[in-house]
Image (spheres, rainbow, N blue to C red):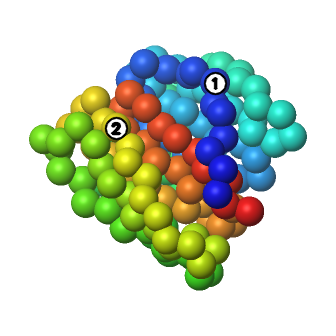
Amino acid sequence: MKKIKLPYTSERIIGVSLPIKGVYYVCDHDEVHEVTISPNVSVRVLDNDPFEMLESLPLKLSLYEEKPLISINENSISYTFEPTKDYVDVNYIINGETGNIRFGILSGDWFSASFSNCGNYLMLAEPYEYALYCIK
């Protein structure tokens, strides 16, 4: 599993979509950022309303309660979000290996982690930070 180096997009996000065909979206209170990760990483600001865009995205981690994909194929994750802590431990079994990602959080508002539907990515997100890992 490899962490993908991502460009800075926003200071306080309300949600981030899971990658589909190498593209995902970051929504903050004012803007929508389209991030392409394949074949090269790039960011483009869209004119879309961020709240409408977030609502229209089928697979996302956000301020609003979502149902993350915590297992796919032979891979799985587990975690407990405690709003008073400054980190979340995400335990994983990926490609037969077990491990832990300690993800720092700055806000107790929300945290979520999920596999993408294709099973190639794992995303962790909270209002001030998100991380994306390539599983393959």
Residue furthest to the left in view is 84
Closer to the N terminus: mark 1 or mark 2?
A: 1
Q: Position of residue 41 (x, y in %)?
A: 76, 31
Reading the image, the residue beneath label 1 is 7
Q: Nearer the viewer, residue 4 or 60?
A: 4
Reading the image, the residue beneath label 2 is 104
Secondary structure found at label 2: strand
Residue furthest to the bottom in view is 74
Q: Quadrant of the N terminus?
A: bottom right
Q: Is residue 46 visible?
A: no
* Closer mark to the observer between disc 1 and disc 2: 2
Rendered residue at 37%/67% (across/down) = 78
Vertical position of residue 127 compared to residue 90: above or below: above
How many residues crowd around disc 1 within 10 Å: few (fewer than 14), some, or many (20 or more)? few
Q: Nearer the viewer, residue 15 or 94?
A: 94
Vertical position of residue 58 compared to residue 92: above or below: above
Q: Is residue 100 visible?
A: yes
| Mark 1 touches mark 2? (CB < 8 Å) | no
Rendered residue at 49%/20% (across/down) = 10
Rendered residue at 38%/44% (across/down) = 103
Q: Which image quadrant is residue 118 in?
A: bottom right
Q: Is residue 102 left or right of residue 132?
A: left
Q: Quadrant of the C terminus?
A: bottom right
Q: Position of residue 65 (x, y in %)?
A: 31, 54
Q: Which mark is residue 61?
A: none
